[in-house]
Image (cartoon, rainbow, N blue to C red):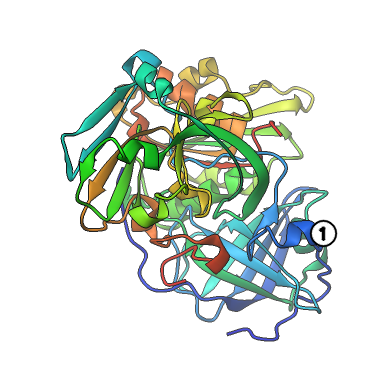
Amino acid sequence: MERRTIPGRLSWQLGEVVATQEETARAKSITLAVPHWNGHRPGQHVDVRLTAEDGYQAERSYSIASAPEPEPRVTLTVERIDDGEVSPYLTDELRVGDQLELRGPIGGYFVWEVQMGGPLLLVAGGSGIVPLMAMIRSWAALGSTIPIRLLYSSRSHAGVIYRDELARLLKSNSKLEVVHTLTREQPPGWTGYHRRVDTEMLREVVWPVEQRPLLYICGPTPFVETTATGLVTLGYEPGRIKTERFGPTGET
Amino acid sequence: MSKGFVSRGFQGRRKSGGERGRIPPGQYLERGFPVLSAGPTPHTPLANWDFSLLGEIDPPKRWTWEAFCALPHEKVTTDIHCVTKWSKLDTHWEGVSVDTLLKQVAYDAHYMIAESDGGYTTNLPLEDVLGGKAWVVDTYEGQPLSPEHGGPARLLVPHLYFWKSAKWVRGLRLVRQDEPGFWESLGYHNHGDPWKEERYRGD
């Protein structure tokens, strides 16, 4: 496993919401101007801290969706968890002009930068697309010609986060391929995959083992388990498979 | 730098009195059991599994799975705290205490590096793992520990953030000089006390 260090201390700082965008009925992007932001690497996340009037605080981690930019700015995409404590505030209450306390960037392993090479296989389950989108956006912004293939599992067509942007990127980049699977609901005439990611689908979609792709998987735990185990079964090197998981295993 | 800041419109969900004293700052209560791993889950067959004590010890020690299972096991009920913010209360584990393991060897060391299948490492001062503070566990809630949660065996150091409780642990390397492990080299805190919120370097 490779290593890279993050220098310095991560202090809490205030960002100001400068833009928001509904991505789906449940997911919203929030762009923050953060005066002391020192930049980030695609794949990293931030900690967000909310403080109530009486001083009560709640913290959560959210992936960064934006590519590194020259301006001190960062975009998060947050999926609303209905019984959540923090995400409904971020998606429903927070608006342009509000301040949000955050610190970061955090995480130095689940990152990809163009100098790391490829080809790149990204596998996203639901909002697991967010850190992978930061990689794709960075790749596009730098005009990289490294081949990228994205396998992206969503419940429905309407639930595909960044759907239009991905379609635009596809048109303008011949080195990008996007394969969607819609697991619960498909639009009329849908000819793509309509089941959960499994080993057979991975066999059809991924680069040949001999090309030694770099593989990044992000999504709910069972999705990541299935995908990572499937890729190892197909012969990909475990050391080139990086994972980021969220949510419970289903046990209590 | 943001003293006195209030998040406009944020109410929050206060913890009940009993839980409040058990959940460290910045953590929230989780009823499920989330998983956090940097790579694929290793699946080492028990016939190939062993557990070793290495480093500044004489002579090195190695247990097969059967020999490890024969060591005296303890039951542990404890709260656990992950640096990704969730805490889980009253989890039940069974395993061999690090005291029991280290009693079997002579060593000259102040630190240990836990080493896992897949290349993961984490570093700990011996004072944080001796005296009934750490175990190598193979059972969770009465069942064999599942691979995604670190089975067949993981380290359990519940008073520190859970990344110190290395999954798929295969050995402990005893060393005189501390050296950062995997996450400790990637910006996370070297020690990781949740009650001091030692999440990241410099905290």
* Residue at disc 1, secondary structure: loop
How many numbered marks, from 0 up?
Answer: 1
Indicate the amino acid at tag 1: Ser
Label 1 crowd bin: few (<14), some (14–19), many (20+), radius 10 Å: few
Residue at horizontal 52 percent and vertical 46 percent from the top: A132
- Visible residue check, residue A236: yes
On screen, residue B44 above or below A160:
above
Residue A240, located in which quarter of the rendered image?
Answer: top left
In the rendered image, residue B37, in percent from the top left (x then y), is placed at 48, 40
Provide the chain ID for the residue under circle 1.
Answer: B
In the rendered image, residue A63, in percent from the top left (x then y), is placed at 57, 55
- Visible residue check, residue A152: no
Residue of label 1: B16
Q: Is residue A114 left or right of residue A229?
A: left
In the rendered image, residue B57, in percent from the top left (x then y), is placed at 18, 42
Q: Is residue B191 left or right of residue A61?
A: left
Residue at horizontal 60 percent and vertical 58 percent from the top: A61
In the rendered image, residue A3, in percent from the top left (x then y), is placed at 31, 52
Give the camera-side residue of B28 and B37.
Answer: B28
Residue at horizontal 19 percent and vertical 34 percent from the top: B60
Residue furthest left in the image: B58
On screen, residue A62 above or below A207:
below
